[in-house]
Image: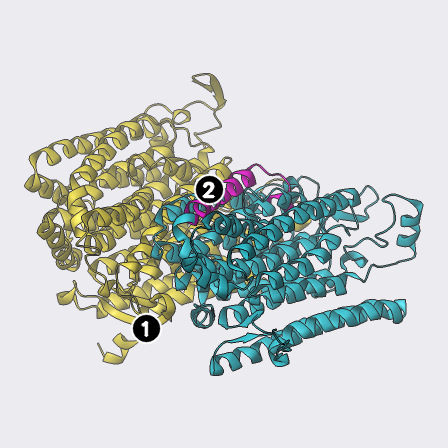
Chain colours: A cyan, B yellow
Amino acid sequence: MNQFVPPEIDWAALSPVLIVLGLAVVGVLVEAFVPMRARRATQVVLAVVGVGAALVAVAWRWVVVQDEGPTAVVAGALREDAPALLAQAILLVCAFVGLLVIADRSSGEDAFAPAAAAIPGSAYEAEARKAGLAQTEVFPLTMFAVGGMLVFPAAADLLTLFIALEVLSLPLYLLAGLARRRRLLSQEASLKYFLLGAFSSAFFLMGIALLYGYSGSVRFDELATAVPATSGLDGMLLAGVLLVIVGLLFKVGAVPFHSWVPDVYQGAPTPITGFMAACTKIAAFAALLRFVYVVVPGLQWDLTVALWVIAILTMIVGTVLAVVQTDMKRMLAYSSVAHAGFLLLGVIALVPSGISSVLFYLLAYGLATVGAFGLLTLVRERDADGNVTGEALHLSQWAGLGRRHPVLAVCFTLFLISFAGIPLTGGFIGKFLVFGAAIEGGAWPLVVIAVLASAAAAFFYVRVIVLMFFTEPAGTDADPGTTVVRTEGLTAVAVVVCAIGTVLLGVLPGPILDLTASATKFML
Amino acid sequence: MPTQFADLPWLTILIVVPTVVAALIWLVKPLRRAARPIGLATSVLVLIGVALMAGAFETADAAEVQFTQTVDWISAIGASYAVGVDGMGLTLVALAALLVPVVLIAGWNEVTLPSGIAADRAEDSLAYRRAGFVSLVLVLESLMIAIFAAQDLFLFYVIFEAMLIPVYFLIGVYGGPNRRGAALKFLLYSLAGGLVMLAGVIAVYFQTDGGPGTYLLANLGDIASDNPTLQMWLFLSFFIAFAVKAPMFPVHTWLPDAAAQATPGTSTLLVGVLDKVGTFGMIAICLPLFPGAAATAAPVIIVLAIISIIYGGLVAIGQNDLMRMIAFSSVSHFGFIVMGVFVGTQTAMVGAMLYMVAHGVTIAALFLISGFLTQRGGSQDMRTYSGMQRVTRVLAGTWLFAGLASLALPGLSGFVPEYLVLIGSFEAHWAYGAFAVIGVVLSALYILLAYQRVFTGPVPEAGAPVELTGEALDVPDRAGLKDLTGREKWAIVPLALVVLFLGLYPAPVLELLSGVADQFAAILGSAS
């Protein structure tokens, strides 16, 4: 009957994804064949160069797309259009700085368990540590995750989206369990993330099945045309769309699908937390945007209530729970939940500026997040013998840090005020744009709630600033209790890049705004 | 004046220079030790710059915005960098430029080391702390000049929020024992107000055609005039932020805490200049953008202003803390200013504008001189003082002088503006004036009572405990306190001169303000 026609594949359009995944595979081979001494350096170079090259490729495709218009790639499974490319670029920028933090070996060791398979506290683990083993698989794993994330914003059919979801999630589940210290916590986080992630994947698949049953297709464009044309199967359609959205909202960390966020953020190795918090959110929001803007417009009346409730809950729960946290990572985790709520405003707006504003917000948020978690890796505890141990994550341990390490404290303050949305930082312009899009889309009650939530959120950001600058440090000058370790330089570079980016986005956002302004329409 | 002189981007230079110097002092280590002289020299240069600018200002066109400079900033959202001043902006810029060097001189030795610093590092950390203080004050000076010069709504908002940060650190790092709580309270109040304003700023954008230059104040006017309900909401979103800043009853409660905990210099800038941003915004932004809503809301606002006047005065009388007393007196004075803005007569509007300047100067003198006293006495509690006029004569005399200016004694700076506001209020409605007059009486009470408690009576004997309710304080040897030093006198002299000038010959300043006042009063008049 139907003759099989092999799809024409535009390899050039796939180049960013191919570079990243290809180098990830090379990374696996490196694990097998390169001697241990040279392995780490090779992996770091491969990963950093790979992400950099992918960024260049994305820039090249951007120019091509600007000239020739968006195209459907791989038989319509992917779309190469302005929002997709821009999201990929933002993703790669954040992944690049995130990788620098991951690669850093402050105080002589990296943040990962020397032998992840060893039972925590066992003799084998101690041996592995003494032998100086390192789990350099971290880098190929990260690259696989980045590869999946790159597909996410471009995916234009549900199966591709699902595969990308799994490709980005599986490495993250693993990475979350690799922390060098507090290993039980880390493994618990990994397991929790995996179980809940599997749950959400099931939801997602069920949604795909329902939508396929409804429309006979898994492609966004065919779904979009089926929505107004097919009648009588509304129940299936709505349930399907909702389930798919739930799957994406899980990745985003929106309430009520957020329960994994604090535990995983806390348990995962801090550099991975930073990478994950920034990049997963960028990828998931880009995919959510495409799905909602392409498929949902015909369903606005049916879905608005659900999305509004989720956005309101996300903003309020994230803010309120962040206020009572005493652990830095948990506080930032809940703050990221609140930010997901703010970002949802741009998604719900369903106006062209919603797309561009969310993308800008993601860039500002991603930079501040990687920078903030990067700084967390430098502030450490010291044991009785004066050896540097794990990160000092309790709020009280940050008391008086501004006095001893003004530059670090000023950078952290910068990221915090960007989170809080105070002017002259990227976070402010992002909030401005997203709230603007929401008002344009008629969602002004949400904006009122968002504004109130922002004011309340300022409290816990400012509390950290108060601690760092106004509070007397707990220890004495000789033994401060909390110490700041010297980095190899990579984290410092990442933090400085993030800080400069945050300020530039706030003071001179013009060029970036011009870029995002051209990304206001998804190709159907 | 040669034209090249007037063509220079004066305001931008005045905005940039203090910030650059601040960054240098803070970052370059060798400069830290000389932070105070460098900071003072910079602020004096800025003052000279403002004076030159005032000289080149066309007084005849005082209602026009002059020294304008407009550059596209973020064209995607219609924001520009646009600065320029009219008569009101110029006087407020001058006020800020005057107070900064005064504060720096007065607070020369104000910044001290916290306890627990090792002796070998003491010198370094002291220099560091002092450099930090001077830098923050200079950054604040930049922002103060910028906000009174902003001719773009977005720029105004950005500076409005950015200003919080240096003030927050000034209160939180350099203040009294409860400074952290006070700084946090200040920040949260202001942020909450500011974020509400943000919603308004965004909403304004969608009431325009968009495009570059959307937010220029010159291009904005009577927003949403066909939808009074929407305009009222927009008006409120701005007004609430300004009312918090001003501070007006019932959102004033952050001020007494902040003023009592901050150093006298910070309080001076906070109440003397920063709070004027609130009333400035009411005039320059609320009135032209939302005239209909302003006219509708005016009666309610005036009632709140009258409550502020009377409530502030009454509570000031009951204070034991000298700084809190001055803060509450300001709540009362700000009530006068707000009333002058919203009663809608030209006389009251001129009065309100002049009031802003006059109040800035007198409150600076009161805060600084009280600061000299409390530094010597080691306590802000008025009950621990008495008879100080026999010990520190000049201090007592200058305090009384500033206090009399504050209670509007004829011939001093407070008189003319208060008189104008009252006359203007009577013109609008007799009841407004009648209630506001109570404030005049109250101001005499709280100033003179405070003087009586602190400066008259017998000098307490050294070591004699003063019985306070529930607590007994050991009074240190008050009889041995030194009078004002030369440096402190020099800090007060410029203020005293301006107080006399505004009281005896306010004509030049009134000339600057009356054109602007005509314009804004007419907006309110035609709308109601």
Type of amino acid at the residue the image marks with label 1? Pro
Magenta part of the chain: A303-331
The residue at the point 87 percent across, 68 percent down is A32
Q: Which mark is residue A456?
A: 2
The residue at the point 67 percent across, 66 percent down is A147
Residue A53, by quadrant, is: bottom right
Q: Is label 2 on the same chain as label 1?
A: no
Chain where mark 1 sits: B
Q: How far across and how far down the image is residue B475, in percent?
A: 47, 25
Residue B396, by quadrant, is: top left
The residue at the point 73 percent across, 73 percent down is A22
Chain where mark 2 sits: A
In front here: A59 or A377?
A59
In front here: B60 or B521?
B521
Q: Which mark is residue B77?
A: none
Q: Secondary structure at mark 2?
A: helix
- In-image side of A492 versus B445 (left or right): right
Q: Secondary structure at mark 1?
A: loop
Q: How far across and how far down the image is residue A257, in percent?
A: 58, 44
Q: Is B13 contained in the magenta span?
A: no
- In-image side of B247 versus A34 (left or right): left
Depth-wise, is mark 2 or mark 1 nearer the camera? 2
Please name the residue that numbered disc 1 is placed on: B9
The CA span between labels 2 and 1 is 40 Å
Give the overall secondary structure of the magenta segment. Answer: helix
